[in-house]
Image (cartoon, helix red, strand yellow):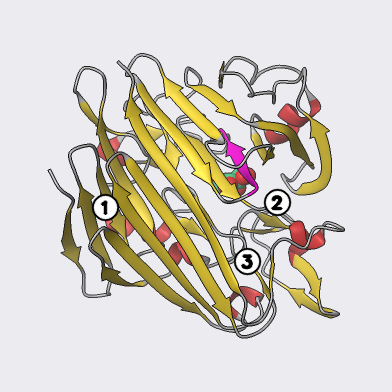
Amino acid sequence: MSLQIKILEKYEDGIAIIELKNEYLSVRLSNLGCNIMSIIMRDKENKYSDIVLGFDDIEDYKTQDKYFGALIGRVANRIGNGKFELNGDKYILPVNDSVNHLHGGLEGFDKKIFGFEILENGIEFYYLSKDGEEGYPGNLNLVVKYTLNKETLKVEYTGVCDKDTVINITNHSYFNLSGDFENICDHYLKIKSDYISKIDENGLTIGELMKVENTPFDFNEYHQIGERIEESHEQISLGQGYDHPFIFKCEENQIELYHERTGRKLTISTSLPGAQLYSSNFLDGRTKGKNGIYYNYRSGVCLETQMLPNSINIEGNSDTILRKGEKYNSYTEYKFEVLR
Ligand code: GAL
């Protein structure tokens, strides 16, 4: 089957649901926060399941605070105390996570309605984030392209701003390859990384690197996510599990997630230098998701490719600065295979 692209819903407020479907995958996207609402794939017995957490009703995406499936920006993760300095100017952003600014603020990109255009091989979303929106400088023109090629969903982000600004965009899908959304502890994970950046008691990246060797953070070989998640380690306690930025040591296929019973495997390849591994430590069984299932602690895993969180406040790390008129460009590819 060649790729079919269909607009499934178009609501009065401009929100739409679009499906990309081929013989391997069926992916539902929304222009509300460029959301990946569902990814349906088969397992080794040819049983189809949805492998991302989310909601049945689009209304729930408007009010959610877990960021299921969403694009995150202008700056993903935390900015310490909601403050930063750029070119000598001080910027104050809304604080929405204890003392820090999180995931773009009170109304980040996850809550914005993007314009869109259907392409031959996917869909392009666009949005103008105005100067001063959530405290960030400059009018940022953002374009996000999703394309589906066989078993691979590719997401490309480009942006241009009319002032110097900061940018760090990611996607916040919670994966559970088992399809039953119970627990991701039995998933095998591989991350090609020798260092994480340490976090503090509020989950803020402080920029101090830690070698993963001989710690529960060494995923250079496959380990089940649950294998060492309860181990006594300062960083595990601070994150209440995994909630840390990993710094990649190679340039492609940096992450693999494998679920043995179903044979489903996800390989992530990105141009970005790292990813936040988040083992859904803040899901608490109170969020009612798809098919009436309440999502619990560790029912999904987020593999959020991005630059180092809080970069703008970390000395010598200017990666997230986007200069006026220059082009921001990054991509992440998600390849979904079935091993038999
Ligand atoms: C993650 C972040 C977590 C938490 C979560 C949203 O990206 O690392 O600490 O804020 O988003 O609930």
Residue type of the residue flagged with mark 3: Ile
Question: Which residue in the structure is indicated by mark 3?
Answer: 167
- Magenta highlight range: 273-279
Question: Which residue in the structure is indicated by mark 1?
Answer: 57
For residue 84, side relative to residue 136 (left or right): right
Say if residue 183 shows up in the picture: no
For residue 110, side relative to residue 162 (left or right): left
Residue type of the residue flagged with mark 1: Asp
Pointer 3 and pointer 1: residues touching (CB < 8 Å)? no
For residue 161, side relative to residue 145 (left or right): right
Q: Which tag is nearer the camera, tag 2 or tag 1?
A: 2
Quadrant housing the N terminus:
top left
Say if residue 326 shows up in the picture: yes
Question: Which residue in the structure is indicated by mark 2?
Answer: 308
Q: Secondary structure at mark 1?
A: loop
Q: Residue at x 76, y 31 (%)?
A: 235
Q: Secondary structure at mark 2?
A: loop
Magenta stretch contains residue 258: no
Between 137 and 180, which is closer to the camera in this rendering? 137
Earlier along the polypeptide chain: callout 2 or callout 3? 3
Is the magenta region chiefly helix, strand or loop?
strand
Q: Residues within 10 Å of mark 3 (few under 14, many from 20)?
A: many
Q: Seen from this angle, which residue lies furthest front?
A: 251
For residue 7, above or below residue 271: below
Q: Mark 1: is the Cβ under 8 angstroms from ligand 1?
A: no
